[in-house]
Amino acid sequence: MDGLSVNTAKSLLGRNVNLHLKDSSVIVNVLLTEIKKDEFKKAFIKCIPYRRKNTLNIPLKSVAWAELLNLNLMLSGS
């Protein structure tokens, strides 16, 4: 499994996604805000959980794929 590439992650910036990690866990409904690189050239995705103020930094190499969400469908049911 190759994982999520930097170009694909850049195309998802500013959108809500479910992040599927390589260890089979899922981080549900996060807003991707930016992609950062540390001093060792490792890429991290900075994301914010829905309706929260704290941020998460997730290594890009640990993300298998991202599932794009449509919040309009979720909010219209309420």
Image: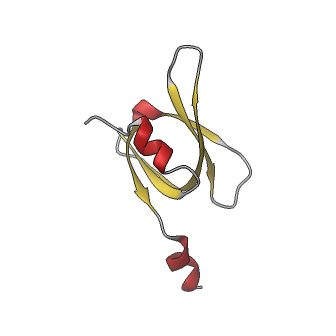
Q: Quadrant of the N terminus?
A: top left
Colouring chosen for the image of the structure? secondary structure
In the picture provided, is 5 more to the left or to the right than 16? left
User: Residue 51: x percent and y percent?
Assistant: 69, 61
Residue at (49%, 70%) from the top-left corner? 70
Instruction: Specify the farthest residue to the top.
Output: 40
User: Residue 76: x percent and y percent?
Assistant: 56, 84
Residue at (47%, 64%) from the top-left corner? 69
Q: Nearer the viewer, residue 2 or 62?
A: 2
Instruction: Specify the farthest residue to the bottom.
Output: 77
Compared to 54, does 39 lie above or below? above
Instruction: Specify the farthest residue to the right.
Output: 53
Give the number of marks. Answer: 0
Residue at (50%, 28%) from the top-left corner? 43
User: Residue 46: x percent and y percent?
Assistant: 60, 40
In the picture provided, is 25 more to the left or to the right than 44? left
Q: Nearer the viewer, residue 72 or 11?
A: 11
Q: In which quarter of the image is the C terminus?
A: bottom right
- The answer to which quarter of the image holds residue 5 is top left
User: Residue 10: x percent and y percent?
Assistant: 49, 43
Compared to 44, does 18 lie above or below? below
Q: Nearer the viewer, residue 13 or 72?
A: 13
Residue at (54%, 71%) from the top-left corner? 71
